[in-house]
Each structure stands twice: as C-alpha cells, then as structure tokens.
Image (cartoon, rainbow, N blue to C red):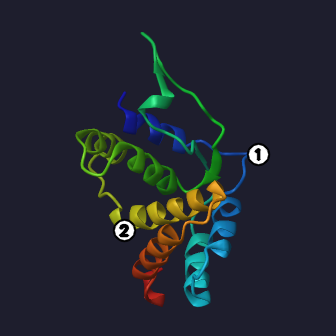
Amino acid sequence: MSLGMMHRDLHIRPSEGLPRAGSIYEPALRELPGLAPELRERTLVWLRGRRDDRLCHGAFYPGNVLVTRSEWRLISWRRAFAGDPLCDIARTLTRLGRYSRLRRWYLTGYFGKEPIPEEELQRWSCLNEVAELYASGHYNPLKSMILRRRLASIYQSPASG
C-alpha cells in the first residue's frame, strides 16, 4: 500500500468526537491582521461550504507512519480533526515539498487516475498557513502580508467559490 492509498483509506472513515475544521480555521481568519472584511467573509463562506465529516490526521507524512512486516501504523494523532480530506492532503503536500518525487508518488497513490484538484489544494494550503500562524501565537507582519495577498489572489471574486 502506498502512502497516498493509506491516506485515502483514512479519509473514508467518519470523525465522530473530533473538533471540526471550522473551529481551527475560522478563529485564524478572524484574527489575521489587516484582512479586508469582504475578503474575510468570502473566505469564510467558502470554508463553511466544505465538508467537515471525514477523519483527518492533521500531520500525515512519512515520519508519522510506522511500517512493520505485516502492516503500516499511523502515529501522532494530536492534530486530528473532522474536516475536508483536501485540507489534510494540502497539509501533507506541504510536508512533502512542492516538486519532489515523493509528492508525485503520494498524489498518484491517493487520486489514482482521477484529476488532482489543484485549485482546491492551493486554497487549503493557504488556509493551513493562516491557521499555523494563528496557532503559533506570534505576530509576523511579513507573513501576515504574504498570506493576505495569497488570500486575495485566491478569493478575488465572488465567482471563485
């Protein structure tokens, strides 16, 4: 079983009792300094339209997979949440690197011959960065400005959602 196939198998499972993605991302968007109110609202509308019922690991990458002779085991569940699998995939891609062979192998394992939803993954990647900045508790003006610009380019028009 490939890493991508393992992750896909995880995402078909329900996520009862875990925090919802909105509880992670909405506060981060509300607190991002300098974000225009209409852009914040447009982003929140998009976020609220995503599914939030699948088991997401939150830190799925090779370092959290133990391999034995007979099985693979996933460790480090402290960031698990209920959410859209694409959010979890975007987090994994960040850990794997943008141009690596491992990234391509992972995506092929996850999606097979299905088209890869690049635009959705870019949206989630940006929101993941916003959430990480918020969780760090440290204000970084340069990072905040970069994230505001990325959000503006992704959610630039009402038709983008």
Between discs 2 and 1, the one toward the N terminus: 1
Question: How far across and down, in percent of the image, does residue 117 sit?
Answer: 36, 62
Q: Find disc 1 in the rendering and name its residue.
A: 17
Quarter of the view holding residue 27 = bottom right
**Dots 2 and 1: beta carbons under 8 Å?**
no
Residue plotted at (59% across, 41% down): 13
Q: Secondary structure at mark 2?
A: helix
Q: Is residue 50 above or below residue 89?
A: below
Residue 64 numbered mark, or none: none
Q: Is residue 113 left or right of residue 2?
A: left
Residue 126 vs residue 50: left or right? Answer: left
Q: Residues within 10 Å of mark 1 (few under 14, many from 20)?
A: few
Query: Is 75 left or right of 70, judged from the image as shown?
Result: right
Q: Position of residue 48 (x, y in %)?
A: 63, 71
Instruction: Provide residue 129's location: percent of width, then percent of height.
Output: 51, 60
Among all residues in the image, which is located at the extreme top? 69
**Which residue is the site of mark 2?**
119
| Residue 101 coordinates in the image, percent (x, y) | 23, 40
Q: Nearer the viewer, residue 35 or 79?
A: 35
